[in-house]
Image (spheres, rainbow, N blue to C red):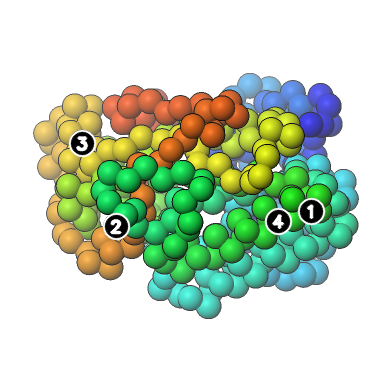
Amino acid sequence: MASQASINCIITGAGGFIGQALASTLLTDPKVSKLTLTDVFEPPIPEAKTESKVETSSSPADLTSLETCQSLFTPKLNLIYLLHGIMSGAAEANFELGLKVNLDSTRQILDLLRNTNPGVKVIYPSTTAVYGPPATPTTRISELNTPVPGSSYGAQKHICETLLDDYSRRGFLDGRICRLPTVTVRPGKPTGAASSFASGIFREPLNGEKAILPVSKDLELWICSPRTVVRNLILARDIPKEKFPGTRIVNLPGITVTIKEMLNALEVVGGDKILNLVEEKRDEEIEKIVLNWPTRLDTSRAKQLGYVEDGSIENTLKAYIDDYVHKTGETN
Protein backbone atom coordinates (compact mmCIF):
# COMPACT_ATOMS: atom_id res chain seq x y z
CA MET A 1 0.00 0.00 0.00
CA ALA A 2 1.21 3.48 -0.80
CA SER A 3 2.49 5.54 2.11
CA GLN A 4 0.63 8.48 3.59
CA ALA A 5 -0.26 11.28 1.15
CA SER A 6 1.40 9.47 -1.76
CA ILE A 7 -1.53 7.92 -3.62
CA ASN A 8 -1.97 9.18 -7.18
CA CYS A 9 -5.40 7.88 -8.21
CA ILE A 10 -7.59 7.92 -11.31
CA ILE A 11 -11.32 7.10 -11.42
CA THR A 12 -12.92 6.26 -14.76
CA GLY A 13 -16.67 6.65 -15.02
CA ALA A 14 -16.23 9.35 -12.38
CA GLY A 15 -19.30 11.27 -13.54
CA GLY A 16 -21.58 8.50 -12.34
CA PHE A 17 -23.10 8.35 -8.90
CA ILE A 18 -20.63 5.85 -7.40
CA GLY A 19 -17.70 7.68 -8.99
CA GLN A 20 -18.82 10.98 -7.49
CA ALA A 21 -19.41 9.48 -4.04
CA LEU A 22 -16.05 7.71 -4.14
CA ALA A 23 -14.25 10.85 -5.28
CA SER A 24 -15.88 12.92 -2.53
CA THR A 25 -14.57 10.49 0.07
CA LEU A 26 -11.07 10.27 -1.43
CA LEU A 27 -10.77 14.07 -1.44
CA THR A 28 -10.49 13.98 2.35
CA ASP A 29 -8.38 10.82 2.53
CA PRO A 30 -4.98 11.69 4.06
CA LYS A 31 -3.33 8.95 1.97
CA VAL A 32 -4.33 10.59 -1.33
CA SER A 33 -2.19 13.33 -2.89
CA LYS A 34 -3.62 13.49 -6.42
CA LEU A 35 -6.97 12.52 -7.94
CA THR A 36 -7.91 12.44 -11.62
CA LEU A 37 -11.55 12.11 -12.67
CA THR A 38 -12.62 11.15 -16.16
CA ASP A 39 -15.77 10.14 -18.05
CA VAL A 40 -17.26 10.58 -21.53
CA PHE A 41 -18.12 14.09 -20.34
CA GLU A 42 -16.10 16.27 -17.97
CA PRO A 43 -17.15 14.94 -14.56
CA PRO A 44 -17.78 17.52 -11.85
CA ILE A 45 -15.35 17.68 -8.98
CA PRO A 46 -17.55 16.94 -5.95
CA GLU A 47 -17.50 18.95 -2.78
CA ALA A 48 -15.28 17.49 -0.10
CA LYS A 49 -16.92 16.92 3.27
CA THR A 50 -14.03 18.77 4.91
CA GLU A 51 -11.13 20.86 3.65
CA SER A 52 -9.18 18.95 1.00
CA LYS A 53 -5.49 19.18 0.14
CA VAL A 54 -5.77 16.71 -2.74
CA GLU A 55 -4.64 17.97 -6.14
CA THR A 56 -7.65 17.25 -8.36
CA SER A 57 -8.28 17.38 -12.11
CA SER A 58 -11.18 16.41 -14.34
CA SER A 59 -11.44 15.79 -18.07
CA PRO A 60 -13.65 14.10 -20.68
CA ALA A 61 -12.14 11.01 -22.28
CA ASP A 62 -12.97 8.37 -24.87
CA LEU A 63 -11.48 5.27 -23.28
CA THR A 64 -11.93 3.29 -26.50
CA SER A 65 -9.13 5.46 -27.94
CA LEU A 66 -5.62 4.08 -27.36
CA GLU A 67 -4.10 7.55 -27.67
CA THR A 68 -6.42 8.89 -24.97
CA CYS A 69 -5.65 6.00 -22.64
CA GLN A 70 -1.92 6.47 -23.15
CA SER A 71 -2.22 10.09 -22.04
CA LEU A 72 -4.26 9.22 -18.95
CA PHE A 73 -2.72 6.02 -17.60
CA THR A 74 0.80 7.14 -16.88
CA PRO A 75 3.45 5.38 -14.73
CA LYS A 76 2.90 8.04 -12.06
CA LEU A 77 -0.44 6.48 -11.11
CA ASN A 78 -0.47 3.95 -8.26
CA LEU A 79 -4.22 3.42 -7.83
CA ILE A 80 -6.80 2.79 -10.55
CA TYR A 81 -10.58 2.59 -10.15
CA LEU A 82 -12.27 1.31 -13.33
CA LEU A 83 -15.89 2.38 -12.95
CA HIS A 84 -16.76 3.15 -16.57
CA GLY A 85 -19.18 1.00 -18.52
CA ILE A 86 -22.44 0.55 -20.37
CA MET A 87 -24.98 -0.71 -17.87
CA SER A 88 -26.98 -3.95 -18.03
CA GLY A 89 -30.13 -2.91 -19.90
CA ALA A 90 -28.24 -0.64 -22.28
CA ALA A 91 -25.60 -3.29 -22.99
CA GLU A 92 -28.35 -5.79 -23.80
CA ALA A 93 -30.05 -3.30 -26.14
CA ASN A 94 -26.83 -2.29 -27.92
CA PHE A 95 -24.50 -5.28 -28.06
CA GLU A 96 -21.75 -3.62 -30.10
CA LEU A 97 -21.53 -0.60 -27.81
CA GLY A 98 -21.47 -2.78 -24.70
CA LEU A 99 -18.71 -4.92 -26.20
CA LYS A 100 -16.67 -1.86 -27.18
CA VAL A 101 -16.92 -0.07 -23.85
CA ASN A 102 -17.27 -2.85 -21.29
CA LEU A 103 -14.78 -5.30 -22.78
CA ASP A 104 -12.54 -3.75 -25.43
CA SER A 105 -11.73 -0.53 -23.57
CA THR A 106 -11.13 -2.37 -20.30
CA ARG A 107 -8.73 -4.83 -21.88
CA GLN A 108 -6.97 -1.96 -23.62
CA ILE A 109 -6.46 -0.22 -20.27
CA LEU A 110 -5.30 -3.40 -18.50
CA ASP A 111 -2.79 -4.18 -21.27
CA LEU A 112 -1.50 -0.64 -21.27
CA LEU A 113 -1.06 -0.70 -17.49
CA ARG A 114 0.73 -4.05 -17.38
CA ASN A 115 3.27 -2.77 -19.89
CA THR A 116 3.78 0.78 -18.64
CA ASN A 117 2.92 0.48 -14.94
CA PRO A 118 3.42 -3.17 -13.92
CA GLY A 119 2.10 -4.16 -10.51
CA VAL A 120 -0.19 -1.14 -10.17
CA LYS A 121 -3.27 -1.61 -8.03
CA VAL A 122 -6.48 -1.87 -10.08
CA ILE A 123 -9.87 -1.95 -8.39
CA TYR A 124 -12.56 -3.30 -10.68
CA PRO A 125 -16.19 -3.12 -9.53
CA SER A 126 -18.01 -6.02 -11.15
CA THR A 127 -21.49 -7.42 -10.70
CA THR A 128 -23.39 -10.44 -9.44
CA ALA A 129 -24.97 -10.50 -12.92
CA VAL A 130 -21.98 -12.65 -13.93
CA TYR A 131 -23.55 -15.64 -12.19
CA GLY A 132 -26.82 -16.09 -14.00
CA PRO A 133 -29.89 -17.54 -12.28
CA PRO A 134 -29.40 -19.67 -9.15
CA ALA A 135 -30.30 -23.37 -9.23
CA THR A 136 -33.11 -22.70 -6.73
CA PRO A 137 -34.51 -19.49 -5.20
CA THR A 138 -32.75 -20.30 -1.92
CA THR A 139 -29.36 -21.25 -3.39
CA ARG A 140 -26.54 -19.27 -1.78
CA ILE A 141 -23.85 -18.34 -4.31
CA SER A 142 -20.14 -18.12 -3.47
CA GLU A 143 -17.08 -17.15 -5.49
CA LEU A 144 -16.61 -20.88 -6.21
CA ASN A 145 -19.83 -21.09 -8.21
CA THR A 146 -19.28 -21.15 -11.97
CA PRO A 147 -20.58 -17.95 -13.61
CA VAL A 148 -23.16 -18.54 -16.35
CA PRO A 149 -24.16 -14.99 -17.31
CA GLY A 150 -27.72 -14.48 -18.47
CA SER A 151 -26.98 -11.16 -20.18
CA SER A 152 -24.35 -9.60 -22.43
CA TYR A 153 -23.44 -7.20 -19.62
CA GLY A 154 -22.77 -10.09 -17.25
CA ALA A 155 -20.71 -11.89 -19.89
CA GLN A 156 -18.60 -8.80 -20.61
CA LYS A 157 -17.92 -8.17 -16.93
CA HIS A 158 -17.03 -11.83 -16.38
CA ILE A 159 -14.47 -11.75 -19.20
CA CYS A 160 -12.83 -8.67 -17.68
CA GLU A 161 -12.82 -10.29 -14.24
CA THR A 162 -11.03 -13.31 -15.67
CA LEU A 163 -8.42 -11.17 -17.40
CA LEU A 164 -7.65 -9.07 -14.32
CA ASP A 165 -7.58 -12.16 -12.12
CA ASP A 166 -5.06 -13.82 -14.43
CA TYR A 167 -2.98 -10.65 -14.80
CA SER A 168 -2.84 -10.53 -10.97
CA ARG A 169 -1.87 -14.21 -10.74
CA ARG A 170 1.01 -13.55 -13.12
CA GLY A 171 2.11 -10.42 -11.24
CA PHE A 172 1.32 -8.08 -14.14
CA LEU A 173 -1.15 -6.08 -12.03
CA ASP A 174 -2.50 -6.04 -8.48
CA GLY A 175 -6.23 -6.49 -9.05
CA ARG A 176 -9.13 -6.23 -6.63
CA ILE A 177 -12.39 -7.49 -8.19
CA CYS A 178 -15.50 -6.50 -6.25
CA ARG A 179 -18.79 -8.07 -7.26
CA LEU A 180 -21.28 -5.40 -6.21
CA PRO A 181 -24.89 -5.91 -5.22
CA THR A 182 -27.50 -3.67 -6.83
CA VAL A 183 -26.74 -0.25 -5.35
CA THR A 184 -29.76 1.63 -4.07
CA VAL A 185 -30.70 4.41 -3.68
CA ARG A 186 -28.91 6.20 -6.53
CA PRO A 187 -29.59 9.94 -6.89
CA GLY A 188 -30.00 11.72 -10.23
CA LYS A 189 -31.66 10.51 -13.40
CA PRO A 190 -32.61 6.92 -14.32
CA THR A 191 -29.74 4.95 -15.87
CA GLY A 192 -29.51 2.30 -18.57
CA ALA A 193 -29.24 -0.42 -15.92
CA ALA A 194 -32.03 -2.98 -15.80
CA SER A 195 -32.02 -2.43 -12.04
CA SER A 196 -32.58 1.33 -12.39
CA PHE A 197 -36.11 0.91 -11.04
CA ALA A 198 -34.68 -0.23 -7.68
CA SER A 199 -33.63 3.36 -7.08
CA GLY A 200 -36.42 4.98 -9.08
CA ILE A 201 -39.20 3.61 -6.89
CA PHE A 202 -37.63 5.53 -4.00
CA ARG A 203 -36.05 8.53 -5.70
CA GLU A 204 -38.91 9.75 -7.88
CA PRO A 205 -41.69 9.54 -5.25
CA LEU A 206 -39.51 11.32 -2.69
CA ASN A 207 -39.13 14.04 -5.32
CA GLY A 208 -42.90 14.22 -5.80
CA GLU A 209 -42.81 12.39 -9.12
CA LYS A 210 -44.37 9.16 -10.36
CA ALA A 211 -42.22 6.05 -10.66
CA ILE A 212 -42.76 2.92 -12.73
CA LEU A 213 -42.35 -0.50 -11.12
CA PRO A 214 -41.64 -2.87 -14.05
CA VAL A 215 -41.38 -6.13 -12.06
CA SER A 216 -43.42 -8.22 -9.65
CA LYS A 217 -43.59 -7.15 -6.02
CA ASP A 218 -42.56 -10.70 -5.12
CA LEU A 219 -39.25 -10.39 -6.98
CA GLU A 220 -36.17 -10.47 -4.77
CA LEU A 221 -33.03 -8.35 -5.14
CA TRP A 222 -29.54 -8.48 -3.62
CA ILE A 223 -28.88 -4.84 -2.70
CA CYS A 224 -26.49 -2.59 -0.81
CA SER A 225 -26.49 1.05 0.26
CA PRO A 226 -24.23 3.61 -1.46
CA ARG A 227 -22.42 4.42 1.78
CA THR A 228 -21.44 0.78 2.32
CA VAL A 229 -20.37 0.24 -1.30
CA VAL A 230 -18.08 3.28 -1.26
CA ARG A 231 -16.62 2.26 2.07
CA ASN A 232 -15.87 -1.23 0.73
CA LEU A 233 -14.32 0.09 -2.48
CA ILE A 234 -11.86 2.05 -0.35
CA LEU A 235 -11.24 -0.95 1.91
CA ALA A 236 -10.37 -2.94 -1.23
CA ARG A 237 -7.42 -0.61 -1.73
CA ASP A 238 -5.99 -1.24 1.72
CA ILE A 239 -6.16 -5.05 1.93
CA PRO A 240 -2.68 -6.57 1.42
CA LYS A 241 -2.47 -8.60 -1.78
CA GLU A 242 -1.11 -11.55 0.20
CA LYS A 243 -4.59 -11.99 1.67
CA PHE A 244 -6.02 -12.85 -1.75
CA PRO A 245 -4.94 -16.47 -2.31
CA GLY A 246 -6.27 -18.15 -5.43
CA THR A 247 -8.46 -15.39 -6.77
CA ARG A 248 -8.94 -11.64 -6.44
CA ILE A 249 -12.73 -11.95 -6.84
CA VAL A 250 -14.91 -11.15 -3.84
CA ASN A 251 -18.69 -11.00 -3.41
CA LEU A 252 -19.28 -7.79 -1.47
CA PRO A 253 -21.86 -7.84 1.35
CA GLY A 254 -25.49 -7.02 0.71
CA ILE A 255 -28.99 -7.90 1.87
CA THR A 256 -31.84 -9.82 0.24
CA VAL A 257 -35.14 -7.93 -0.02
CA THR A 258 -38.36 -8.27 -1.97
CA ILE A 259 -39.80 -5.36 -3.90
CA LYS A 260 -42.73 -5.46 -1.47
CA GLU A 261 -40.34 -4.97 1.45
CA MET A 262 -38.75 -2.03 -0.34
CA LEU A 263 -42.15 -0.43 -0.85
CA ASN A 264 -43.04 -1.04 2.78
CA ALA A 265 -39.90 0.85 3.77
CA LEU A 266 -40.91 3.71 1.46
CA GLU A 267 -44.32 3.84 3.13
CA VAL A 268 -42.77 3.89 6.62
CA VAL A 269 -40.44 6.75 5.70
CA GLY A 270 -42.66 8.73 3.32
CA GLY A 271 -46.24 7.77 4.03
CA ASP A 272 -49.15 6.70 1.81
CA LYS A 273 -49.03 9.78 -0.40
CA ILE A 274 -45.45 9.02 -1.43
CA LEU A 275 -46.11 5.31 -1.86
CA ASN A 276 -49.07 5.97 -4.16
CA LEU A 277 -46.72 7.61 -6.68
CA VAL A 278 -45.35 4.16 -7.56
CA GLU A 279 -47.22 2.70 -10.54
CA GLU A 280 -47.02 -0.98 -11.45
CA LYS A 281 -46.37 -1.54 -15.16
CA ARG A 282 -44.70 -4.84 -15.97
CA ASP A 283 -41.83 -4.90 -18.47
CA GLU A 284 -41.04 -8.48 -19.45
CA GLU A 285 -37.60 -7.62 -20.85
CA ILE A 286 -36.45 -5.95 -17.65
CA GLU A 287 -37.91 -8.68 -15.47
CA LYS A 288 -36.24 -11.34 -17.60
CA ILE A 289 -32.82 -9.74 -17.07
CA VAL A 290 -33.28 -9.22 -13.33
CA LEU A 291 -34.54 -12.78 -12.77
CA ASN A 292 -31.14 -13.97 -14.01
CA TRP A 293 -29.39 -12.42 -11.01
CA PRO A 294 -28.75 -14.31 -7.77
CA THR A 295 -30.38 -12.94 -4.63
CA ARG A 296 -28.52 -14.83 -1.90
CA LEU A 297 -24.74 -14.70 -1.81
CA ASP A 298 -22.13 -16.20 0.48
CA THR A 299 -20.05 -13.24 1.65
CA SER A 300 -17.92 -15.09 4.20
CA ARG A 301 -14.77 -14.38 2.16
CA ALA A 302 -15.54 -10.66 2.15
CA LYS A 303 -16.05 -10.65 5.90
CA GLN A 304 -12.77 -12.50 6.47
CA LEU A 305 -10.99 -9.83 4.41
CA GLY A 306 -12.53 -7.03 6.48
CA TYR A 307 -15.25 -5.73 4.19
CA VAL A 308 -18.21 -4.25 6.06
CA GLU A 309 -21.81 -5.44 6.05
CA ASP A 310 -24.82 -3.36 5.11
CA GLY A 311 -27.77 -2.25 7.26
CA SER A 312 -31.53 -2.49 6.76
CA ILE A 313 -33.39 -1.07 3.78
CA GLU A 314 -35.09 1.41 6.13
CA ASN A 315 -31.71 2.73 7.29
CA THR A 316 -30.52 2.93 3.70
CA LEU A 317 -33.54 5.00 2.72
CA LYS A 318 -33.11 7.35 5.68
CA ALA A 319 -29.42 7.80 4.80
CA TYR A 320 -30.36 8.66 1.21
CA ILE A 321 -32.79 11.31 2.44
CA ASP A 322 -30.12 12.78 4.72
CA ASP A 323 -27.40 12.71 2.04
CA TYR A 324 -29.39 13.90 -0.96
CA VAL A 325 -32.99 14.98 -0.36
CA HIS A 326 -32.34 17.16 2.69
CA LYS A 327 -29.04 18.38 1.30
CA THR A 328 -30.35 19.59 -2.06
CA GLY A 329 -34.07 19.81 -1.55
CA GLU A 330 -34.50 17.52 -4.53
CA THR A 331 -32.98 14.34 -5.96
CA ASN A 332 -32.37 15.40 -9.55
The residue singled out by tag 4 in the image is 166
The residue singled out by tag 1 in the image is 170
Q: How many labels does the image show?
A: 4
Type of amino acid under label 3 = Glu
Distance between the alpha carbons at the discs numbered 4 and 3? 40 Å
The residue under the point 70% across, 47% down is 175
Nearer the viewer's eye, disc 4 or disc 3?
A: 4
Type of amino acid under label 2 = Leu
Image side of residue 147 versus residue 67, left or right: left
Nearer the viewer's eye, disc 1 or disc 2?
A: 1
Which numbered tag is attached to residue 291?
2
Q: Which of marks 1 and 2 is nearer the N terminus?
A: 1
Type of amino acid under label 1 = Arg
Q: Which of marks 2 and 3 is nearer the N terminus?
A: 3
Check disc 2: other Cα within 10 Å, few if <14, some if 14-19, many if 20+.
some
The residue under the point 59% across, 46% down is 249
Nearer the viewer's eye, disc 4 or disc 2?
A: 4
Which numbered tag is attached to residue 261?
3
| SS under mark 1 | loop
